[in-house]
């Protein structure tokens, strides 16, 4: 913790200036690229890396060429010690030394719009409209799009597996809480039960996650979906057989009666 922190300790920020925006964002509805107009604009796909300088001086602001930002001193009625209340603004823009962009979409009279694929089984209303800076090869463009979609898909699959695993593990939660109530060794027993439940519930959670994924892949790509469904069925079947045998073994042992009855029979 630097000394500058202690220098400003006890000081308060002045009120936010009324002429400055607190937060918010604005986006264009369309964007020109040569002779074409790009629908929706997609400004988020453009990298703003070039510092900009205002064409005219801003009242009350000074420009620092070193940091490429505008600064404004604190208001006259605010705290002046240690520059508390000083405002700093930096404008960033598009690099016009690389003005080319590559767009994938549907051209309608010079306007690039979203292209909607024809409806097919399990796929309805899929649209494509993407923009990348520079001149990008067609194959490289679609490979990048596929990689982005695949990354999101794998993240969602992993998150789904974690959610299922946590749900299965929570089934043993009451047992861990009950073990914690035992004097002296309760916390140790509770942690052990949680660790065992975490290990035991991992295979069925994995099987359920793969089963959900396999249901869709059976229709789209049977080569991938069928093995996933087989793994799901084998895992769940194994658990069912184990529980059934354990239940039958327990009930059979309780029905056995030992000993011999001795007594007189009525004539």
Image (cartoon, rainbow, N blue to C red):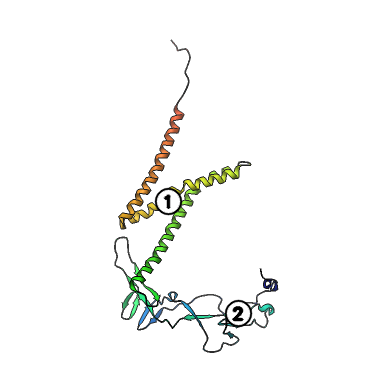
Q: Residues within 10 Å of mark 2 (few under 14, many from 20)?
A: some
In the displayed image of the protein, which residue is found farthest to the top? 267
Give the percent coordinates (x, y) of residue 241.
39, 40
Q: Nearer the viewer, mark 2 or mark 1?
A: 1
- Residue at 37% across, 48% down: 231
Give the percent coordinates (x, y) of residue 26.
48, 77
The N terminus - image quarter: bottom right
Does residue 7 appear to the left or right of 93 in the view shown? right
Exactly how many numbered labels are in the figure? 2
Residue 218 visible at all: no
Residue to which mark 2 is pinned: 87
Residue 188, by quadrant, is top right
Residue to which mark 1 is pinned: 206
Q: Measure the C-alpha gap from mark 2 to mark 1.
A: 53 Å
Residue 226 visible at all: yes
Residue 155, by quadrant, is bottom left
């Amino acid at each position: 913790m630097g000394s500058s922190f202690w220098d400003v300790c006890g000081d308060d920020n002045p009120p936010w200036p009324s002429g400055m925006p607190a937060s918010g964002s604005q986006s264009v509805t369309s964007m020109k690229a040569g002779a074409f107009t790009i629908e929706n604009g997609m400004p988020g796909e453009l990298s703003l890396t070039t510092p900009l300088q205002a064409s005219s001086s801003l009242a009350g602001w000074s420009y620092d060429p070193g940091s490429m930002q505008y600064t404004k001193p604190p208001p006259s009625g605010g705290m002046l010690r240690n520059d508390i209340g000083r405002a700093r603004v930096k404008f960033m823009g598009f690099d016009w030394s690389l003005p080319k962009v590559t767009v994938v979409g549907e051209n309608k009279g010079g306007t690039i719009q979203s292209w909607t694929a024809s409806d097919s089984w399990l796929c309805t209303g899929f649209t494509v409209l993407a923009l990348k800076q520079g001149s990008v090869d067609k194959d490289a463009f679609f490979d990048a799009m596929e990689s982005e979609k695949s990354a999101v898909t794998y993240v969602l699959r992993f998150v789904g597996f974690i959610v299922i695993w946590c749900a299965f593990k929570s089934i043993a939660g009451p047992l861990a809480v009950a073990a914690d109530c035992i004097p002296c060794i309760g916390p140790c027993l509770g942690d052990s039960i949680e660790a065992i439940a975490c290990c035991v519930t991992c295979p069925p959670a994995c099987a359920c996650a793969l089963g959900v994924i396999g249901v869709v892949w059976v229709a789209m790509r049977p080569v991938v979906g069928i093995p996933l469904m087989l793994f799901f069925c084998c895992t769940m079947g194994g658990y069912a057989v184990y529980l059934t045998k354990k239940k039958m073994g327990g009930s059979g042992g309780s029905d056995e009666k030992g000993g011999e009855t001795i007594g007189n029979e009525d004539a």
